[in-house]
Amino acid sequence: MPDESAAADAFDAKVAAELIEAADAELLALEGPDALTSDRALRLSQFKRQQAVERAGRIWDAEGDSDRVGYVLATFRKQRRWSPWQLAAWLGISVYHVKRLSQETRPEGDSKEIRLLLTLLAKRYRANPERLREAFGVGDP
């Protein structure tokens, strides 16, 4: 019986591969070289996964880079003993937007320029501008 099951599994795998190959060939014939074949879909999925890993690395790097907004936000968050979700809720945005905001270059200049740049950043990410300025006032060493 185990040999029959293994043989059946091998047969099923062969038939599935043939069906995928036939579907891909039909798709290529209909849509041309830009068709989303199974092989191309797999490569696209792997590429997106790699992009997500690289993006996550940049986000964590931003918290350790004093030239990034993430450094100030991380300092502020740690002073308050908040989680990233609590900081995001306080700023009125999602954790995703906090992470994107964290990658921005930290504003420099006199207090008026920094205030203006923080307001523009808050607007871009739909964060509460007063609270973002507060985070910089409290969390900026």
Image (cartoon, rainbow, N blue to C red):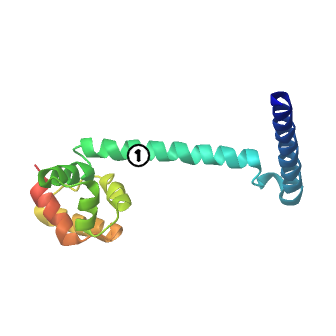
Res 113 seen here = no
Q: Within 10 angstroms of label 1, few (less than 14), some, or many (20 or more) residues?
A: some
Question: Relative to 57, is 138 on the left or the right?
Answer: left
Quadrant of the frame with the N terminus: top right
Residue furthest toward the front? 1
Which quarter of the picture shows residue 94?
Answer: bottom left
Whether residue 8 is visible here, answered yes or no, is yes
Above or below, 128 against 136 in this view is below
Closer to us: 61 or 13: 13
Q: Residue at x 14, y 66 (%)?
A: 112
Could you say which quadrant of the image residue 117 lies in?
bottom left
x and y percentages locating residue 30 in the rendered image: 87, 60
| Residue 103, position as x, y percentages in the image | 33, 51
The x, y position of residue 29, in whole percent, is 89, 55
Q: Amino acid at mark 1?
A: Ala
Residue 133: x, y in percent? 16, 65
Q: Residue at x 24, y 61 (%)?
A: 86
**Residue under the image location 83 percent in, 48 percent down:** 20
Q: Is residue 21 rendered to the left or right of residue 130?
A: right
- Give the residue number, with chain letter if any, for mark 1: 56
Residue lying at 64% horizontally and 48% vertically, measured from the top left: 44
Along the viewing direction, whichever of 103 and 16 lies nearer the viewer: 16
- Report the side of 41 relative to 90 (left or right): right
SS class of the residue under badge 1?
Answer: helix
